[in-house]
């Protein structure tokens, strides 16, 4: 395969939020293109006007940008093969619909939805094909004059593809190998609808892939049944020699049990199935997203890449986008569905938080901190992040775990108070406050620890008794990093304020 020959596309429909399965398809197209020095296009397939959802296109583009999946051309990127929205290509499709009609490869059908429904009720397993088409209202059986009169009179119609029966149609799939279909299982698919002057997916997809010089089509398993139809359409247009190679990705499966991963699984088990938060414009229902749930984009990319593909045992699980491009081979994708292990996604995110620059993490937390009225100080936030990030699986957890560095506790964890706060605790912390008031404002961690431990030993107080109450006073609970790292960041004045408040409140 020459590098120059690779040209792939991601072609979502703007019918709602981008599912994580669609993210994987986009990612694999991106990795395949980059691994072969090729090009990736973004095409919006919006010919189904009934299912169009406002805002969905912008959401898809924003989500892919956030993940670092960037395109060489397409919607919002420009290029020489536009327009890249199918709804803007009506004139192009009409030409190819007419070409099929003129060649006798397609025909016009006037059957109403009511007539089709009646057939389905009276004919078992009805499909519009070689055995039934002659009993329907179409240009194969109606006189030419009647067809012309119906069209002139404004009758709505569709154009159907004429599928010859009993042909063996072979699809050479890069993941599944050669897959054979008999054309008799196909119906005469609708290619165009006069009602909205738009083609269906099947025609628009083939015409666009041909005109945009797509060399490989990587898409979900759900499109495998349409592959033989697309092969027949390429042949009908005389484009068989330029037909792209196909790769159909296996499904993403539920974390438990059988079946395809759905939004309901995420709602039930508490994980997102969309890259970004989505608000349904019709119902106002809010769905969580990986970004807003505190995931780093590189963690999501690494996690999703390994759902149905792996580079082999010689490589680590943790891989940057550059690593993924280096090792990605479409032939190594699994034919079997991949269970969606959302706990593994948390593991990846935890890892990437650990290795991320503290200042970067601080900046990511900035909007949430400022929304709470906290004055943002990059250095201070980065130091707080460095102390607690080892414990955080998400940025949401990270924000929660640094909160006490900005807001002194106003209440104290009841179970810790019950267990740790004794009759002499207030007196001991009062003495500790007096000791700390003589120390430098910075309260350097190691030096302060040495002074406090020496004082505890001299007084004969229990180390745990003092330290646990000290932590409770500073944090409000039995949590947090090394105690004297906390005091060093808070400083002497704030540490004393918190001690005094705890003594006053807990008594």
Image (spheres, helix red, strand yellow):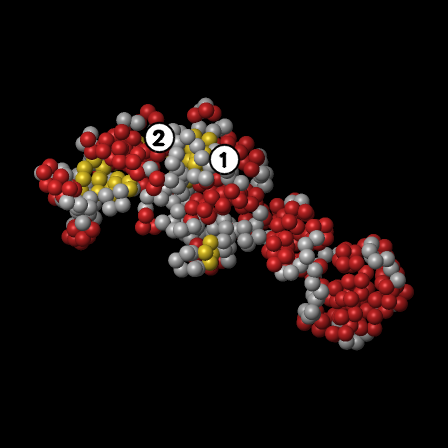
Q: Residue furthest right?
A: 458
Q: Position of residue 36 (x, y in %)?
A: 49, 28
How dense is the environment of label 2, judged by Cα within 10 Å: few (below 14), some, or many (20 and up)? few
**Pick the front one: 259 or 247:** 247
Depth check, mark 2 against mark 1: the one in front is 2
Q: Secondary structure at mark 1?
A: helix
Q: CA distance from mark 2 to mark 1?
A: 23 Å
Along the line of sight, the residue nearer the viewer: 430 or 348: 430
Disc number for residue 215: none
Label 2: which secondary element: helix
Against 362, residue 174 (above or below) is above
Q: In this rendering, would 256 be left or right of 126? A: right
Nearest to the observer: residue 110 or residue 55: 55
Name the one closer to the observer, 290 or 337.
Answer: 290
From the top left corner, tell me how far across and down residue 416 is, in percent: 70, 69
The quadrant where residue 196 appears: top left
Is the Cβ of the residue at disc 2 closer than 8 Å to that at disc 1?
no
Residue bearing the label numbered 1 = 31
Please indicate, yes or no, whether residue 222 appears anywhere in the rendered image: no
Residue positioned 87% across, 60% down in the render = 439
Examine the rendering and report whether any part of residue 440 can be seen: yes
Residue 350 image position (x, y, % from top left): 61, 49
Decide: is 505 above or below 118.
below
Tally the numbered discs. Answer: 2
Pinpoint residue 382: horizontal percent, then vertical percent. 70, 50
Q: Which residue is mark 2?
A: 211
Q: Earlier in the sequence, mark 2 or mark 1?
A: 1
């Amino acid at each position: 395969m020459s590098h120059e020959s690779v040209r792939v596309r991601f072609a979502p429909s703007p019918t709602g939020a981008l599912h994580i399965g669609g993210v994987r398809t986009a990612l694999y197209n991106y990795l395949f293109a980059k691994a072969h020095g090729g090009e990736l296009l973004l095409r919006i397939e919006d010919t189904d006007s009934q299912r169009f959802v406002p805002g969905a296109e912008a959401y898809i583009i924003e989500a892919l940008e956030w993940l670092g999946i960037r395109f060489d051309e397409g919607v919002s990127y420009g290029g020489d093969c536009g327009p890249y929205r199918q709804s803007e290509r009506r004139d192009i499709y009409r030409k190819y619909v007419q070409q099929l009609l003129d060649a006798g490869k397609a025909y016009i059908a006037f059957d109403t939805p009511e007539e089709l429904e009646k057939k389905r009720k009276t004919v078992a397993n009805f499909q519009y094909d070689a055995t039934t088409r002659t009993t329907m209202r179409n240009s194969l059986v109606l006189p030419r004059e009647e067809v012309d009169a119906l069209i002139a009179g404004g009758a709505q119609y569709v154009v159907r593809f004429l599928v010859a029966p009993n042909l063996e149609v072979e699809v050479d799939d890069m993941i599944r190998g050669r897959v054979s279909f008999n054309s008799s299982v196909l119906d005469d698919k609708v290619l165009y609808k006069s009602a909205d002057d738009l083609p269906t997916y099947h025609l628009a997809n083939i015409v666009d892939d041909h005109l945009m010089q797509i060399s490989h089509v990587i898409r979900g398993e759900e499109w495998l049944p349409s592959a033989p139809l697309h092969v027949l359409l390429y042949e009908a247009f005389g484009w068989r020699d330029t037909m792209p190679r196909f790769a159909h990705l296996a499904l993403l499966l539920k974390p438990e049990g059988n079946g395809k991963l759905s939004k309901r699984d995420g709602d039930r088990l508490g994980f997102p199935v969309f890259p970004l938060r989505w608000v349904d414009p019709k119902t106002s229902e809010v769905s969580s997203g990986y970004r807003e749930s505190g995931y780093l984009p590189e963690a999501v990319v690494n996690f999703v890449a390994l759902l149905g593909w792996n580079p082999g045992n010689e490589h680590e699980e943790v891989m940057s986008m550059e690593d993924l491009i280096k090792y990605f081979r479409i032939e190594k994708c699994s034919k079997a569905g991949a269970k969606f292990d959302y706990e593994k996604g948390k593991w990846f995110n935890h890892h990437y938080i650990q290795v991320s620059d503290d200042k970067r993490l601080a900046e990511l937390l900035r909007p949430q901190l400022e929304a709470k009225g906290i004055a943002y100080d990059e250095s201070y936030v980065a130091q707080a992040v460095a102390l607690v990030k080892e414990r955080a699986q998400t940025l949401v957890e990270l924000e929660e775990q640094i909160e006490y560095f900005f807001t002194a506790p106003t209440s104290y964890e009841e179970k810790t108070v019950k267990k740790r706060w004794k009759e002499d605790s207030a007196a001991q912390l009062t003495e500790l406050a007096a000791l700390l008031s003589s120390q430098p404002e910075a309260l350097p961690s190691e030096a302060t620890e040495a002074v406090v431990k020496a004082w505890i030993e001299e007084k004969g107080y229990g180390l745990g008794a003092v330290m646990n109450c000290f932590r409770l006073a500073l944090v409000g609970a039995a949590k947090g990093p090394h105690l004297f790292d906390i005091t060093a960041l808070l400083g002497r004045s704030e540490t004393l304020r918190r001690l005094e408040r705890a003594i006053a409140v807990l008594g």
